[in-house]
Amino acid sequence: MGFGSQSGQVMFGTQTAKGTPLVMSATVGVAMKLRSGSLAPNRELLIPDPEIGGGRDTTDAYLGTVSFGGDYEFYARLESITTLLKACLGGASSATATGVNTHTITAVDTALPWLSVQERISNTLDAYDYLDAVVNTFHLEAEANGYLQGTAGLIAMRQTPQATPVAAPTWDNSPLLVGTNITVTYNAVTLPAKSFTFDVNNNFEDDDFRLGSFFLGDLTPKQREVTASVTVRHADSSLFRQATYGTPAAVAVGGVTTKQQVVITATTYEDIPASTPLTKSSITITLPNVILEPFAFEPSADDVLESDISMRAVRPVPGTPIVTVVVKNGKATIA
């Protein structure tokens, strides 16, 4: 009869330290609803080269080193997304007032948290526990007439098969977010954006294999890349001039770039149940210093002029985080 995917489950939780698995239960960790994805083994057969004196056929092959990775795609819900954001960016603090839980997640220079992941493939096929996992990439996107969606790219160092899945996990059933409740501001001015994307890439080194072991010795993050983009219809040429010439009012090509703040805000229709006064759940992404990447107008027959504008976040002041995310929801802690 085959195995259906919809009956599976994935749980995440933050470890206290590398090598220390989080034992998840109905009250520990969070189960996240997914659109697709799983952690797959990255492994190859070691096939020897032809040898003088040997035959034309391969005589044998062995299995080599292994790591585990993949992309989880999801509709963004604000009680589980904080776990992935904390693992991706590193710093997190939480406060509760008048029934509203505010989680402030910032990009830090110190070591990033490790995750434990429990993945159940279908309802009877197999279940796995993953130890020492990291969030290598994180992506959010939305269109004006669509849902806020995300993708998290994880890498794990160890896998234990035939795990015992949590029978009654704590699912994140919080509300979804849609494009009609999303705004993007640039230099405190709301952009007429038709869509947006937000990306973090930690560029983890994932080939640190060592003699005497099948598994990675460590996962080390390299240069962090934080980018965003918007699709806009042009009201004037100021964005083009800033991206291509350096400043909005430039009349000649320059070399110095303008750095401005970008804020992406998404809010639910629903209120946080315990909030007083009633307050919507929300996520606010602040990029203090963003440079527009050069682009060109692309006129086409009867089409209205619009452009995909890419933005690169930079950090000219060491004490200011390159990105800060504030999430307000109904959950007091980050799993």
Image: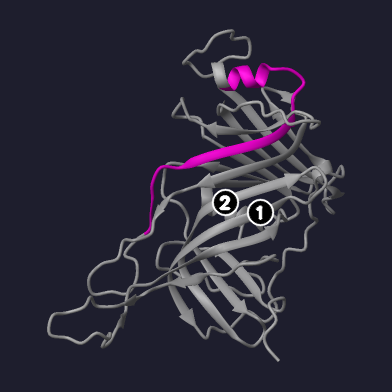
Q: How far apart are marks 2 and 1 (CA)?
A: 7 Å
Q: Where is residue 173 in the image (x, y as percent from the top left)?
A: 77, 63
Q: Which residue is disc 2 drawn over? A: 138
Q: What residue type is labelled 1?
A: Gly
Residue 283 lies in quadrant: top right
Work out which quarter of the rendered image holds the N terminus and state it. Answer: bottom right
Instruction: Specify whether residue 159 is in view.
Output: yes
**Label 1 residue SS:** strand
Q: In this view, does 39 lie to the left or right of 120?
A: left
Q: Judge the density around disc 1: few (<14), some (14-19), many (≥20) Cα neighbours within 10 Å.
A: many
Earlier sequence position, callout 2 versus callout 1: 2
Q: Which residue is disc 1 drawn over? A: 150
Instruction: Specify whether residue 90 is in view.
Output: no
| Whether residue 232 is situated above or below residue 188 in the rendered picture | below
* Residue furthest bottom in the image: 1
Q: In this view, does 6 lie to the left or right of 162?
A: right
| Whether residue 167 is situated above or below residue 195 in the rendered picture | below
> Looking at the image, which residue is at 40% across and 63% down?
18
Give the residues drawn in magenta, as a range: 219-243
